[in-house]
Amino acid sequence: MPSPESPLIIALDYPSLDAALCMADRLDPRRCRVKVGKELFTRSGPDVLEALHGRGFEVFLDLKFHDIPNTVAGAVQAAAEQGVWMVNVHAGGGRRMMEAASECLKRHGLHTHLIAVTVLTSMERVDLAEIGLDIEPLEQVERLARLAQQSGMAGVVSSARESARVRELCGDDFLKVTPGIRPSFAGVGDQRRVLTPADAMAAGSTHLVIGRPVTQADDPMAALEAIERELID
Ligand SMILES: O=c1ccn([C@@H]2O[C@H](COP(=O)(O)O)[C@@H](O)[C@H]2O)c(=O)[nH]1
């Protein structure tokens, strides 16, 4: 199956394999990718990857590895050997951790996209201050995006509000994977740095991660189609 041209990645944040596959069976792997995160993977393990690959989906395994370099390199290798399209680490784990993960993939000839999380989209300035960073999220995203690129990452996770600046700093080819996407019809919930799908693309995001606005909608397919229409208009 060819890679979808769509930038959409649907977050399958469900508490069971059955619930996740029920949603996946309503999606079209030619029109979007899917994301498996901590809740689903902790419950279902690698079976979910096999099931989604069997249905033709490219999968972003969003486990945000953050540990010592040797441990993260091994985890990233394990993910890539299971055929995932994308996997991520926390840029906060530092240069040596990211380099170890990137070099491990290269050494084993694995071509999974390896990206790094900068500042979670649920965080704003006040949250950073509480962990000792008295700066705007944008400043920390800039710092970590530069470090991630120097350390061999193919891109970063940030909010779409920072995509234009990340593009200026790191170039067009550097992936800008942005959760915190909120179409006008969806509630913000626990997210803080949000943007609409169209504004995110205009800002330079390369991929849009969308969960609850689709998965918790009364009619998920209608919500997805509304987002697709917004991106075409
Ligand atoms: O900074 C980040 C990193 C990851 N996420 C993940 O993306 C989805 C967003 O889901 P919504 O329901 O659209 O809010 C979710 O799986 C998060 O774990 C993020 O939101 N922010």
Image (cartoon, grey):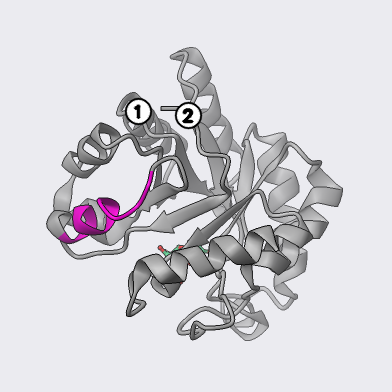
Query: Which corner quadrant holds the N terminus?
Result: top left
**Type of amino acid under label 1:** Gly
Measuring 21% from the left and 52% from the top, which residue is drawn there?
21
Q: Secondary structure at mark 1?
A: loop
Q: Residue 83, labelled with which disc?
A: 1
* Disc with the residue nearer the chain's start (1 vs 2): 1
Please name the predominant secondary structure of the magenta segment in the image: helix
Q: Is residue 97 visible?
A: no
Q: CA distance from mark 1 to mark 2?
A: 7 Å
Callout 1 crowding tier (Cα within 10 Å): few <14, some 14–19, many ≥20: some
Q: How many marks?
A: 2
Q: Nearer the viewer, residue 167 or 97?
A: 167
Residue 141 magenta-highlighted = no
Residue closest to the eye, 102 or 112: 112
Left or right of 129 on screen, residue 105: left
Identify the residue shown where x is 50% and y is 22%: 111
CB of mark 1 near ligand 1 (< 8 Å)? no
* Magenta segment: 19-28
170 to the left or right of 217: right
Residue 199 position in % (x across, y down): 72, 68
Is the C terminus in the top left, top right, bottom left or bottom right quadrant? bottom right
Q: Position of residue 149 (x, y in %)?
A: 70, 39
Residue 103 as seen in the image, left or right of residue 30: right
Q: Which mark is residue 217?
A: none
The reply to whether dot 1 and dot 2 touch (C-beta < 8 Å) is no
Instruction: From this view, report whether residue 75 is shown above or below residue 20.
Output: above
What residue did someone put label 2 on? 112
Toward the right, the furthest residue is 168
Vertical order, 167 against 153 (above or below) = below
Q: Residue at x 44, y 40 (%)?
A: 30
Tell me residue 192's x, y (percent).
58, 80
Label 2 sits on what residue type? Thr
